[in-house]
Image: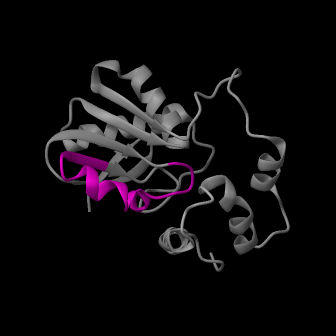
Amino acid sequence: MPIVENQGARIYWDEQGQGQPILLIMGLGYTSALWHRTRPVLAQRYRTVAFDNRGVGLSDVPPAPYSIATMAADAAAVLDAAGVARAHVFGISMGGMIAQEFALRHPTRTRSLILGCTSPGGPSALRAESHVTDILVARGMTLEQAREVILPYIYDVATPREKIEEDISLRRRWLPSPEG
């Protein structure tokens, strides 16, 4: 299992495909396994390098919080471990924020920047509407209730429910058990 250590955390990563390298950076709370629809298509033409952000999946869970800068350093460490000097960088959601930080810190290592459903962050960023933020920080809901309430903000209304359930099932495998 490929692992790289960075700033006190062991970061899991892997690669698929051949061609120009593309670094895949997933969003908050999701493992690299959630690239399951996109990655096979990309791997037909590109060498995909994906990793689990610190705190999720097969990567370590050091004490939080984790800064975007630290997570961008994790991304650089993954590219180093993969022997990649320069890559296309594709980030979604929080992964897009990490990708932007990576590009700012490592412009010569960034071949292109692909951003999906993300924000530049910072004081002038457009914030989520208050009712969305309320959902994210709500207490008193079960995990199942919280998941159902947030789905309209993650998926388009035309997304088939079976695709959503497939993603939920995949993500559920990586959630901590209630016992510990």
The answer to which of 179 and 38 lies nearer the viewer is 38
Report whether 132 appears left or right of 179.
right
Residue 146 seen in render = yes
> Is 34 inside the magenta-drawn segment?
yes
Say above or below: 72 vs 140. above
Say above or below: 175 vs 22. below
Q: Position of residue 14 (x, y in %)?
A: 27, 55
Q: Magenta stretch?
A: 27-49
Residue farthest toward the left in the current orientation of the protein: 18
Total tally of numbered discs in the picture: 0
Q: Tell me which colouring the rendered structure shows.
A: one colour
Residue drawn 14% across the image and 48% down it: 18
> Is 51 inside the magenta-drawn segment?
no
Residue farthest toward the bottom in the current orientation of the protein: 179
Q: Position of residue 136 (x, y in %)?
A: 75, 53
Residue 7 seen in render = no
Q: Position of residue 115 (x, y in %)?
A: 46, 35
Which part of the image, by quadrant, shows the C terminus? bottom right
Q: Position of residue 147 (x, y in %)?
A: 68, 66
Report whether 127 appears left or right of 56.
right
The answer to which of 67 and 160 lies nearer the viewer is 160
Which part of the image, by quadrant, shows the N terminus? bottom left
Say above or below: 139 vs 130. below
Residue farthest toward the front in the current orientation of the protein: 158
The answer to which of 22 and 176 lies nearer the viewer is 22
Residue drawn 56% across the image and 37% down it: 118
Report whether 91 appears left or right of 86.
right
Residue drawn 47% across the image and 71% down it: 170
